[in-house]
Image (tube, rainbow, N blue to C red):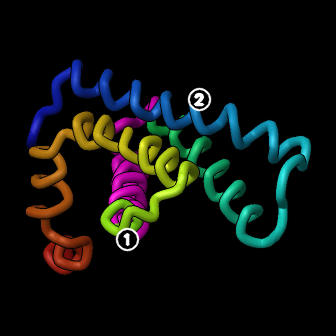
């Protein structure tokens, strides 16, 4: 079993709190009041981010069980930075909105720093799959 220090757990909880409070303070007022753009994709984004903030609250209580939420957060931000921001920067076509979003997405470095990577390797990469565990139990 790979132990995770109490300081790493506190760091993880702080990251979940940052997601829940930071994004939640923006999304939930809009969701509750129905304000802003609710056309198809902006509405989908609001609801997805609202759901993410609720799940981040669970992460404060269960920081290791909720690691997949942080994997999702890291994945979409890295994909966006590589697929959208980097090409815009390379072609010198980055506008202010794209630059602002790139800076905000760049905060994902805190998530990468908070994740207990030895634990992730032991429990998500090296561990047997659920199917293999079921077969062994039968």
Relative to 79, say whether 55 is above or below. Answer: above
- Residue drawn at x 55%, y 49% as measured from the top left: 96
As helix, strand or loop, the secondary structure at mark 2 comes to helix
Residue 47 visible in the displayed image:
yes
- Residue drawn at x 43%, y 50% as measured from the top left: 102
For marks 1 and 2 on the same chain, the one whose residue lies earlier in the sequence? 2
Relative to 10, say whether 18 is above or below. Answer: below
Q: Is residue 131 magenta?
A: no
Q: Give residue 138's mark.
A: none
Q: Residues within 10 Å of mark 1 (few under 14, many from 20)?
A: few
Please tell me in which quadrant of the rendered image residue 11 appears: top left
Q: Residues within 10 Å of mark 2 (few under 14, many from 20)?
A: some
Using residue 78 as the reference point, say whether residue 99 is left or right of it.
right
- Residue drawn at x 20%, y 72% as measured from the top left: 129
Q: Is residue 84 magenta?
A: yes
* Nearest-to-viewer mark from 1 and 2: 1
Question: Mark 1 highlights which residue?
Answer: 83
Question: Mark 2 highlights which residue?
Answer: 21
Magenta: main secondary structure? helix
């Amino acid at each position: 079993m790979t132990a995770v220090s109490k300081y790493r757990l506190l760091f993880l909880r702080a990251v979940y709190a940052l997601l829940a409070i930071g994004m939640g303070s923006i999304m939930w007022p809009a969701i509750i009041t129905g304000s802003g753009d609710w056309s198809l994709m902006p509405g989908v984004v609001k609801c997805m981010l609202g759901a993410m903030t609720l799940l981040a609250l669970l992460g404060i209580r269960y920081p290791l069980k909720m690691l997949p939420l942080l994997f999702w957060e890291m994945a979409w931000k890295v994909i966006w930075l590589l697929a959208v921001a980097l090409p815009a920067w390379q072609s010198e076509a980055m506008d202010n909105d794209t630059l602002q979003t790139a800076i905000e997405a760049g905060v994902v470095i805190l998530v990468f720093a908070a994740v207990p990577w030895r634990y992730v390797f032991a429990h998500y990469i090296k561990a047997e799959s659920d199917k293999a565990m079921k077969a062994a139990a039968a």
